[in-house]
Image (cartoon, rainbow, N blue to C red):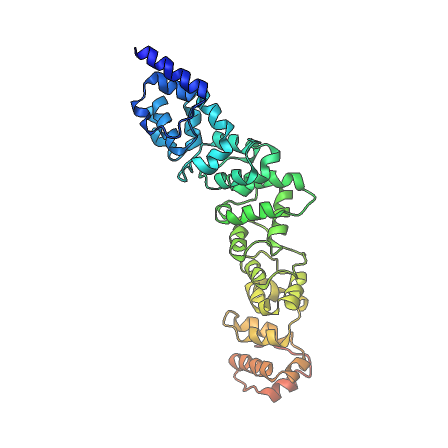
Amino acid sequence: MDIIRFDNVEFLIESLGLKFENLLGGVYLSRNLMNLIIEGKHYELSDDNIRIIIPYINPELYQIYETSSYTTIINTKKIDFIKYINNYLGDCIENVFPDTSIFEDESTIIGILHNENIEDDIKTKYLSKQSNKVNLHEVKTIFWDIAIDSNIINPTWKNIEKYISVNVNNNLNPTIVNFISRNSHELSQQKIKGIISDTTDNRLFLELMGSNLLPIEDYEQIGKSFDQSFISTDLSSLESNRMETLITTQGVEFNEYNYELVNEHFPELSLSFTLQNKSVFLSDLTSYPLSSNIANSLLNKKELSLKEKLQIIQTLFLTMLQDNSTLSDSVCTVLNSSSKIPVNNVFILEITSVPLKLGRY
């Protein structure tokens, strides 16, 4: 009698092409009937129905579905079930799988990426929330941009080098710049030197640190990865806070070219640039001409010793002292601290009318 009833039900389901909207009563259905429903795809694709089917196939997979839905479906190894899901995978990842499905494994992520039947925006939305990452060499080149946009590529300089290697003659595109920005903290903990080629290292340093592409907080983070400095690059278009970061981190070499660059385009940073590199500055004062204001500031800085201030005074021109009483006062203060002879502005103007001989100070 049971066999007859099943045959009748089977005939009705098959002949009418019935699809069960809700299988919540599936726990009470016979195994034969459940097999018929699953193998014949006689059910609507919904989160509730999938949660009924998975434990029927393999009870051990039920809990895993919550956090890695498609991976769990693949792991059922139930061919009819997997094929049905695959036929509507785009709809499943957009509307069916739970929002908690954020731990798909690497092979599943690659499978979704390479699925040409899923729209790019649906792929990106689902993959963007995944916690596991893959490396770029595992992804077909045509899907690189989606992978980078989805942020499911491991944030390493090797992966970045591989991505930009196909665009060696072009500037960094917004896709990779946004990726670097999103992962600036992780990347800042990886030193570039020796990890990627010197050519790529130089290119990234120039395009990232020599530009305003990155938000300033990411710019500061990414700078930690580089072990080089600008020697004679035109950085005049750089924002002031970025130049300040380069100066602070010794990302710009102190030389005649950069000294002039900073003085002309970043005058507010001239003093800090000079002080940070005072040993180079003082070793060749004639190569680094001083403005009256900078000279005055240096003479009032505690970071400089008396001897170093006297070195600076010896380079000053009479006209600078004549035209700037504040600077003249500062010179007097320094000289008074180095000699028992009282010094005033008149005295300064008199002695600077001939070459200074301050060796005795």
Residue 86, image x and y in percent?
50, 27
The answer to which of 306 and 260 lies nearer the viewer is 260
Q: Is residue 59 above or below residue 178?
A: above
Residue 149 percent coordinates (x, y):
55, 43
Residue 106 x %, y %? 47, 32
Q: Outermost residue toward the bottom?
A: 346
Q: Is residue 359 visible?
A: no
Of 218 and 106, which appears nearest the observer? 106
Residue 52 seen in the current view? yes
Would you identify the image quadrant in which residue 265 lies? bottom right
The vertical placement of 243 against 348, above or below, is above
Residue drawn at 53 percent across, 79 percent down:
338
State how many labels appear. 0
Report whether 260 appears left or right of 146: right
In terms of depth relative to the viewer, which is nearer, 184 or 36? 36
Residue 73 as seen in the image, left or right of residue 276: left
As drawn, is 59 to the left or to the right of 104?
A: left
Quadrant the N terminus occupies: top left
Q: Quadrant of the C terminus?
A: bottom right
User: Residue 283: which quarter of the image?
Assistant: bottom right
- Residue at horizontal 32 percent and vertical 21 percent from the top: 29
21 lies above or below 128: above
194 relative to 240, above or below: above
Residue 72 appears at what percent x and percent y? Answer: 41, 28
